[in-house]
């Protein structure tokens, strides 16, 4: 049985607080993204890449307008970054570590880019998948967002707008 000492707050799992904060920031972004999607009409099913690109650019512009001061660390706050660094380091040093490294070595390599929040993910640069075994160790994302690896950086990418929402620099261990 636990007893509370007068004036002391109950102990809280620090990771759960950080994850809740991360999830709240992600939810806020997704709300903004969905609101932005109301304006430009989604393209009807088409094979025309120009129409799809036009929609993507319009959506990205509306999202940028909704978060004009967006910067690195808005979603991956310092506390969230520390937690992700720890989770990723544990993944790479654990029993699946060599498989993770091999997966990244065999994927189409993405050299380090000059990443900027609110920029479009560069056209012509491969969208390197995040290994599924690493995804198991990271907080789950809504379908509107995905994790991508660019060099040693972890990118949070808006799927529909092809927008860099946030990123953590140098979080993937060197192979």
Image: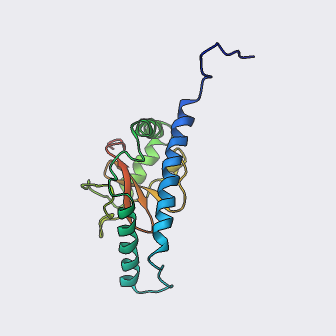
User: Quadrant of residue 11 in the image?
Assistant: top right
Quadrant of the frame with the C terminus: top left
The colour scheme of the drawn protein is rainbow
Left or right: where 140 falls relative to 61: right
The vertical placement of 73 against 15, above or below, is below
Residue 110 visible in the snapshot: yes
Residue situated furthest top in the rendering: 5
Residue in view at x 41 percent, y 39 percent:
81
Left or right: where 85 falls relative to 111: right
> What is the tally of numbered marks visible in this picture?
0
What x and y, as percent, mark residue 7?
60, 15
Residue in view at x 51 percent, y 42 percent:
21
What x and y, as percent, mark residue 148?
41, 56
Name the foreground residue: 156 vs 74: 74
What x and y, as percent, mark residue 126?
34, 65
Left or right: where 9 falls relative to 76: right
The vertical placement of 107 against 167, above or below, is below
Residue situated furthest left in the rendering: 114
The vertical placement of 31 against 140, above or below, is below
Name the foreground residue: 40 vs 153: 40
């Amino acid at each position: 049985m636990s007893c509370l000492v007068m004036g002391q707050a109950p102990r809280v799992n620090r990771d759960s607080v950080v994850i809740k904060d991360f999830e709240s920031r992600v939810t806020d972004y997704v709300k903004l993204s969905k609101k932005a999607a109301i304006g430009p009409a989604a393209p009807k099913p088409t094979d025309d890449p120009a129409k799809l690109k036009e929609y993507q650019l319009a959506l990205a512009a509306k999202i940028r307008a909704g978060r004009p001061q967006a910067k690195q660390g808005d979603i991956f706050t310092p506390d969230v970054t520390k937690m992700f660094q720890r989770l990723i380091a544990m993944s790479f040093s654990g029993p699946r570590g060599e498989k993770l490294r091999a997966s990244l070595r065999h994927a189409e390599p993405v050299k380090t880019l000059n990443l900027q929040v609110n920029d479009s993910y560069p056209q012509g640069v491969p969208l390197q998948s995040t290994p599924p075994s690493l995804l198991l160790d990271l907080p789950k994302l809504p379908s509107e967002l995905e994790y991508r690896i660019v060099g040693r950086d972890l990118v949070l990418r808006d799927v529909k707008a092809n927008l860099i929402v946030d990123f953590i620099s140098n979080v993937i261990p060197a192979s």
